[in-house]
Amino acid sequence: MKQKLLQKIQNRQIAVGVVGLGYVGLPLAVEKAKAGFKTIGFDIQPHKVAMVNAGKNYIGDVVSSDLSQLVKKGMLSASSDFSFIKDMDFIAICVPTPLDMYQQPDITYIKKSSEDISKYLKKETMVVLESTTYPGTTEELIKPILEKGSGLKCGIDFYLGFSPERVDPGNLIYNTKNTPKVVGAVGEDATEVIAAMYRAVLNGDVYTVSSPKVAEMEKILENVYRNVNIGLVNELAILCNKMGINFWEVIEAAKTKPYGFQAFYPGPGLGGHCIPIDPYYLSWKAREYGFHTSMIESSMMINDRMPEYCAERASKILNRYKKAVNGAKILVLGVAYKQDIDDYRESPAIKVINELKKEGADVVYFDPFVPEYRDRGKVFKGELELTKELLQSADLVIVATAHTAVDYDFVQKHARIIFDTKNAMKNVKNRDNIELL
């Protein structure tokens, strides 16, 4: 099986299936097709399937012309019918792994996808999970489901592995194509073949590890590392505010050290799919071993509270100007979870808005990348334009996302009071009406 698959990879005879056409799946499907592998994407959302088949892009990290050309050439298509799995030689699972209402891992999408794949899984197929999850998912959850549903044996009839996604929306340097990949699979043969498949597609290095568990923990480490360090700077930012110290200046000074320090920055909280969620997966799994991830959980508590802290700071700022938050008009600049993208998943800005609304504030927002967002089943529309009149009408302007497309000199000139939670206005010279987080 190993030699046969390696030969098919070399000859570009592998049929690729990508389950889940979101921020991870669609860029991966495009790269597979660009590398000469005929690719079919699967998604339960009909509008995504229709857009892909029409050659229309909806993900920022995908080049629209690449997508349309691949569809025209017949190298890429999409489907809502899982039976296409029976013709696939390589299947990547790129489904969401959110938290449930109790802040515990929701592996419903992984489980359901695995069950559906098992019904059509054929011999000599590679199955790779890319969704971020807790260590043990591939071997403890997916492997038994695939074996039971297909009647096939992992390592003998099919190969199974884990290769964590590394997607950073809006990153102008690293993308799916050139970011190094980690692969851990069940058995040495599986590791070799799955790594060969990624090497045939990507420009970045492919680093192999001894098992899926190692690869799963590696991905968690990447994001827990950032969560803990962001929690540290968020806590220090709160302290420095009490001490009357500009913490942003402190960070810039610390950055001058050429070794032993990496800069992280405070903000209104964590957003996106990975950093605010992955630590919960690890802490949940750790309890199975009677272990409490105390440092990680502490950073999570700090970061989770930042939207509430920012709302409290906004209230105190208004109070100094003899204005109650109840009835105040507040303009929030940016609801995307990071600068210069349209992704608002887990956005702390939206949480800040909700906190302010709880206190009776009249909150509006402007985001050049997010004209509207959905939260708790409702759609909220932003202001169409950032005008002088809009800025002057607000009792307080809160910069919650540091979009570079915003003219911050214009904002400073016409806003009454500004609470900059991202230091987005660091280059604005007149700072009389600006307060930093």
Image (spheres, grey):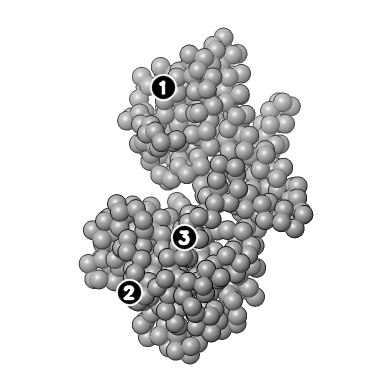
Give the labeled residue for mark 2.
38
Q: Earlier in the sequence, mark 2 or mark 1?
A: 2
Q: Earlier in the sequence, mark 3 or mark 1?
A: 3
The answer to whether mark 3 and mark 1 are in CB contact below 8 A is no
Residue 385 visible? The answer is: yes
Give the labeled residue for mark 3.
112
Location of residue 239 (image quadrant)? top right
The Cα–Cα distance between marks 3 and 1, rounded to whole angstroms, is: 48 Å
Q: Residue at x 29, y 71 (%)?
A: 75
The Cα–Cα distance between marks 3 and 2, rounded to whole angstroms, is: 25 Å
Q: Residue at x 44, y 89 (%)?
A: 4
Q: Secondary structure at mark 2?
A: loop
Image coords of residue 280 (percent x, y): 63, 49
Q: Secondary structure at mark 3?
A: helix
Residue 248 visible? The answer is: no
Q: Amino acid at mark 3?
A: Lys
Q: Secondary structure at mark 1?
A: helix
